[in-house]
Image: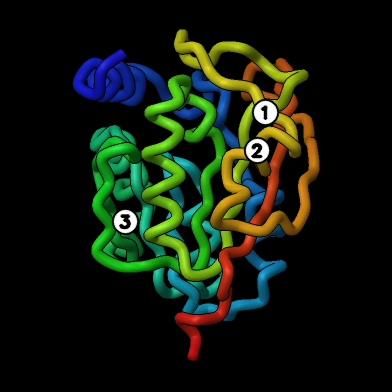
Amino acid sequence: MNSSANKNHWENVYETKNPDQVSWTQKKPQTSLDFINSFGLGKQAKIIDIGGGDSNLVDFLLEEGYENITVLDISAKALDKAKQRLGGKADKVKWIATDITAFEPAETYDIWHDRAAFHFLTTPEQVSKYVDIAKKSINGFLVLGTFSKNGPTKCSGLDIQQYDGESLSEEFKENFEKIGCITEDHTTPFGTVQNFVFCSFKSADPYSSFR
């Protein structure tokens, strides 16, 4: 699927479905919050949520006092939904509507978070672009959550790439050091269970932007 068709797919998903009708919805993304807080960077940390869509992560980060949050998603409609939900708080967040493989960052980030975007990249070229953009963009930590080897093989009608801790680490080994990986079951709004793997990594100099 080319970038234009991919964008159209996701715009249609967010145009036609509510959060309780899509599998990835979480009321509170506790695992993501735990990883982010484990780095101990403080509330000024620059955080970007890749494929954040209308996820509730931004709500909880704002609630916890984080001040430099960016949400990126291929779907402008998804970001509009998040903005509407947040109301006036949306002005505290940077919103970027683009395909992650075409992202040209204007700044670097202390924490790069991605739950369930990376696994939609199914060709070596897409993965390579993502890894290269992450390498250039991260001055700190990377959190990745994907479907595990025991998870689904498709999502939203699209093929995905399954991972485990070892294969995720392999993709990022040249630029990042693995901190740790966990697996967890995510219960969807319609009661099915999806197994995820989450890994955290640090770049070569994870505190450079705080000096």
Q: Quadrant of residue 39?
A: bottom right
Q: Which residue is mark 1?
A: 163
Which quarter of the image is occupied by the N terminus?
top left
Q: Which residue is mark 3?
A: 87
108 vs 120, left or right, is: left
Q: Does the image show residue 53?
A: no
Q: Earlier in the sequence, mark 2 or mark 3?
A: 3
Q: Do the numbered discs 1 and 2 sit on residues whose CB atoms are within 8 Å?
A: yes
User: Where residue 33 sits in the image (x, y, percent)?
Assistant: 64, 57
Can you say whether 96 is above or below 202 in the image?
Answer: above
Can you say whether 53 is above or below 57 in the image?
Answer: above
Secondary structure, mark 1, is loop
The alpha-carbon separation of the residues under discs 1 and 2 comes to 6 Å
Secondary structure, mark 2, is helix
Q: Residues within 10 Å of mark 2 (few under 14, many from 20)?
A: many
User: Where residue 194 sits in the image (x, y, percent)?
Assistant: 71, 22
Q: Earlier in the sequence, mark 1 or mark 2?
A: 1
Q: Name the amino acid, label 1.
A: Tyr
User: Where residue 130 sits in the image (x, y, percent)?
Assistant: 41, 41
Q: Quadrant of residue 41?
A: bottom right
